[in-house]
Image: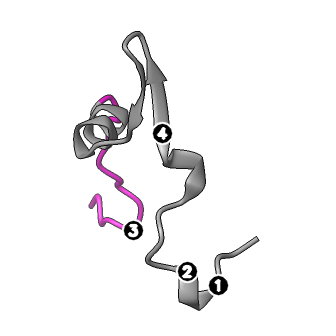
Amino acid sequence: MLKSISSIHEPDIRFRNLADASGTRPMSVADLHAMVEPIQLSECSAGRDTA
């Protein structure tokens, strides 16, 4: 289900808190960086002229 326009700037409640060894805490930008850091992108060669 999509969020309503009036609530688009409200944080998603699924990501409101994280649980770790120290307890429950709000999600931070560092947490978001840690989630995307391991993602490796590869160069796409689709549509390139190889001749």
Question: Circle 2 sits in a helix, a strand or a loop, which is it?
Answer: helix
Graded by Cα atoms within 10 Å as few (under 14), some (14 to 19) or many (20 or more), the crowding at tag 3 reads few
Q: CA distance from mark 2 to mark 1?
A: 5 Å
Tell me if residue 48 comes above or below residue 31 in the rendering. Answer: below
Location of residue 26 in the rendering, given as x and y in whole percent from the top left corner: 38, 40
Residue displayed at 32% across by 65% down: 48
Residue displayed at 48% across by 71% down: 10
Q: Residue furthest bottom?
A: 5
Residue nearest the observer in this picture, 40 or 33: 33
Q: Which residues are magenta?
A: 38-51
Quarter of the rendering containing residue 28: top left
Tell me whether the residue at label 2 lies in contact with that at label 1, contact meaning CB atoms closer than 8 angstroms: yes
Three-letter amino acid code at disc 4?
Asn
Location of residue 38 in the rendering, given as x and y in whole percent from the top left corner: 32, 28
Three-letter amino acid code at disc 1?
Ser
> Of the residues under marks 4 and 3, which one precedes in the sequence?
4
> Of the residues under marks 1 and 3, which one precedes in the sequence?
1
Q: Which mark is residue 7?
A: 2
Question: Circle 3 sits in a helix, a strand or a loop, which is it?
Answer: loop
Residue displayed at 48% across by 39% down: 17
Q: Which mark is residue 47?
A: 3
Residue at the disc numbered 4: 17
Is-magenta flag for residue 18? no
Please name which of the two marks, 1 or 4, marks the residue nearer to the observer.
4
